[in-house]
Image: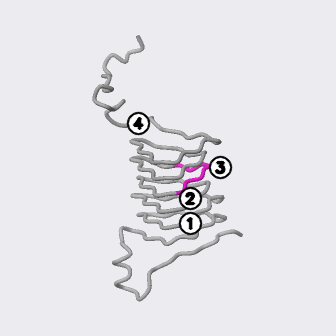
Amino acid sequence: MFGNNSKKDNSSSGSLSSGPSSNSSNSLVAGTNIKGSIDANSDIRIDGKIEGDINCSGKLIIGPQGVVIGEVNCQNAVIEGSFEGVLKVKEILNVKENAKISGDINTEQLLVQAGAIFNVNCNMGGQTLKSIQGKQKEPVELVANLNG
C-alpha cells in the first residue's frame, strides 16, 4: 500500500529486521527505569535510567536527565546526563558541559566540554592500560572537574 513491497518479514527467523536502517533509533524516555541488558543494532537515546549492560552498534546518547549505571560498548557516545561504570567507545566520546561521569573509559578520541564532571580512568588512542604501564611506573589516571 505504501511502497514497502520490497521489504521482507524476518520475524520467523527470530529478528524483526536484518540490520539497522540509516534512520532507525531507539529511545528510553524520562521516567522509565530498566534493570538488565540492552543490545541495539542502531543508535539509542537514554533519557530515563538504566542499570545494566548496553551493547550498541551505533551511537549512544545519554540525554540531560539520563542515567546509566553499568558497562557500555558502543561505536560513538554523547553524554549530557550521568554515567557510572565502564564505557568502551570505538570512535568518539563527546562529554557535554552538564555531564557527570565516573568509572573507566576506553575510547579512540575524547571531547570534554568545560563544566563537565569527569572523574575517570581513561585509556585513549587504542592504547591499553598494559601498554601504558610499560612506559610508566604507575597507571595513568585522569581526574578533572572542569567547572568554571
Magenta range: 61-69
Residue lying farthest to the bottom in this orientation: 137
Quadrant in the picture for the N terminus: top left
Relative to 12, 137 lies left or right: right
16 with respect to 87 (left or right): left
Please report contact status of discs 1 and 2: CB closer than 8 Å, yes or no. yes
Which residue shows up at 43% across the image and 63% down it?
107
Q: Which mark is residue 65?
A: 3
Mark 4: amino acid: Ser
On the picture, is 35 further left or further right than 75?
Answer: right
The image quarter in which residue 119 lies: bottom right
Q: Amino acid at mark 1?
A: Ser
| CA gap, disc 1 and disc 3 | 16 Å
Q: Nearer the viewer, residue 39 or 45?
A: 39
Quadrant that contains the C terminus: bottom right
Secondary structure category for the residue under label 3: loop
Q: Which residue appears at 42% of the width and 43% of the height?
A: 40
Give the mark, 4 or 3, whose residue is nearer the N terminus: 4
| Alpha carbon separation for disc pair 4 and 3 | 26 Å
| Residue to which mark 4 is pinned | 22
Query: Which residue lies at the image location 44% right of the left edge and 45% below the top edge?
Result: 38
Q: Which dot marks residue 102?
A: 1
Give the Cα distance between marks 1 and 2. 6 Å
The answer to whether 124 is drawn above or below residue 29 in the figure is below
The residue depicted at 45 percent of the width and 48 percent of the height is: 37
